Amino acid sequence: KAVIRVAYTDDFHEDAKNSTVVHRHLDQLMPWFERHSHVIAVVQAGFIGKWGEWWGSDYFGTSNHTEFQMQERFNVAAKL
């Protein structure tokens, strides 16, 4: 079975521009995830951070997150 992690780049220079982009992509991908659930072991949180690791993000913050950044992160996690 597959382990899925969505990332926006394979280098250090880009990540999700804002939560609207992430939510739009989740809306697009969720039907695919559901259709292929028989071969997917887990969908990792991903989407946030340079490699989907939830750390180094220009929009969602890197450390000392603001309340807004934390809420944005929670909103992405809840959608998964």
Image (cartoon, helix red, strand yellow):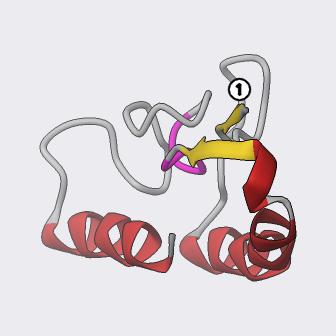
Q: Viewer-proximal residue, 51 or 12?
A: 51
Q: In which quarter of the image is residue 35?
A: bottom right
**Residue at the spot 49% in from the left edge and 78% down from the top edge:** 79
- In this picture, residue 13 sits left or right of residue 31: left
Percent coordinates x, y for residue 2 in the rendering: 73, 33
Q: In which quarter of the image is residue 34?
A: bottom right
Give the residue number, with chain letter if any, for mark 1: 13
- In this picture, residue 13 sits left or right of residue 53: right
Q: Is the magenta stretch mostly helix, strand or loop?
A: loop
Percent coordinates x, y for residue 77 in the rendering: 40, 66
Q: What stretch is highlighted in magenta?
A: 45-49
**Residue at the spot 81% in from the left edge and 69% down from the top edge:** 29
**Residue at the spot 66% in from the left edge and 59% down from the top edge:** 17
Q: Does the magenta stretch include residue 30?
A: no
- Is 55 situated above or below 64? above
Q: Which amino acid does label 1 sit on?
A: His
- Is 56 situated above or below 26? above
Quadrant of the rendering where the N terminus is positioned: top right
Q: Is residue 46 magenta?
A: yes
Percent coordinates x, y for residue 39 in the rendering: 79, 45
SS of the residue under disc 1: loop
Percent coordinates x, y for residue 65 in the rendering: 18, 52
**Residue at the spot 35% in from the left edge and 64% down from the top edge:** 73
- Is 80 situated above or below 40? below
Residue reaching furthest to the top: 11
Q: Viewer-proximal residue, 67 or 41?
A: 41
Q: In which quarter of the image is residue 36?
A: bottom right
